[in-house]
Image (cartoon, rainbow, N blue to C red):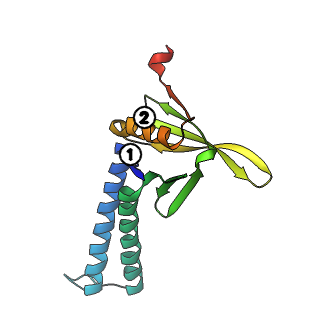
């Protein structure tokens, strides 16, 4: 079972850092108001308790997303995990992987089988450039007849 971490763009880390700072500051001020420290007092204590709970959940969810979002090749299933959501794709449903070299984002195409119809769907795969070759070789080992394509504007011109 080979795991690959989800590669977030730098802008996502900036947003997560801002969310973390806002959450911590909000928790501290709500706690100071509840404790009536420094002349601060809480007019509605329930709102401060709820804000502490809400921002604590936001911090936990943010850290969970950052550290536990990954892609896993199990025995006969490809599993994508983000927060509390898991997408499972069977080996026989995987069709091809198309990678955009400029952005580093890949699309994994698979047959989405709903009762009564057969559709082709895709899943966005974001892997760090240093791990892309290892991911592609693990994907080839997972399914031998997969088509792996690479697109680039420089190559097209």
Q: Is residue 55 above or below residue 133?
A: below
Determine which residue is flagged by label 2. Answer: 104
Which image quadrant is residue 110 in?
top right
- Left/right placement of residue 156 relative to residue 104 reads right
Residue lying at 48% horizontally and 40% vertically, measured from the top left: 141
At mark 1, the secondary structure is loop
Rendered image: mark on residue 7:
1
Residue 43 in view, yes or no: yes
Rendered image: mark on residue 55:
none
Answer with mark 2 or mark 1, whichever residue precedes in sequence.
1
At mark 2, the secondary structure is loop
Residue contact at pointers 2 and 1, CB within 8 angstroms: yes
How many residues crowd around disc 1 within 10 Å: few (fewer than 14), some, or many (20 or more)? Answer: some
Residue lying at 56% horizontally and 55% vertically, measured from the top left: 88
| Residue 18 horizontal/vertical position (percent) | 32, 56
Q: Is residue 56 above or below residue 22?
A: below
Which image quadrant is residue 144 in?
top right
- Left/right placement of residue 115 relative to residue 22 reads right
């Amino acid at each position: 079972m080979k795991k690959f971490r989800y590669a977030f763009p730098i802008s996502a880390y900036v947003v997560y850092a801002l969310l973390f700072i806002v959450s911590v500051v909000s928790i501290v001020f709500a706690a100071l108001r509840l404790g009536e420290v420094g002349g601060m007092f809480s007019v509605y204590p329930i709102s401060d308790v709820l804000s502490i709970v809400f921002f604590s959940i936001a911090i936990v969810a943010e850290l969970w997303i950052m550290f536990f979002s990954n892609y896993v090749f199990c025995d006969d299933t490809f599993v994508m995990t983000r927060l509390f959501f898991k997408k499972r794709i069977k080996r026989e449903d995987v069709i091809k992987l198309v990678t955009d070299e400029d952005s580093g984002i890949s699309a994994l195409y698979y047959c989405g089988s709903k009762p009564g119809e057969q559709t082709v769907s895709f899943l966005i795969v974001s892997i760090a450039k240093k791990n892309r070759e290892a991911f592609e070789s693990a994907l080839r080992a997972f399914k031998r007849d997969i088509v792996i394509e690479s697109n680039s504007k420089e190559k097209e011109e």
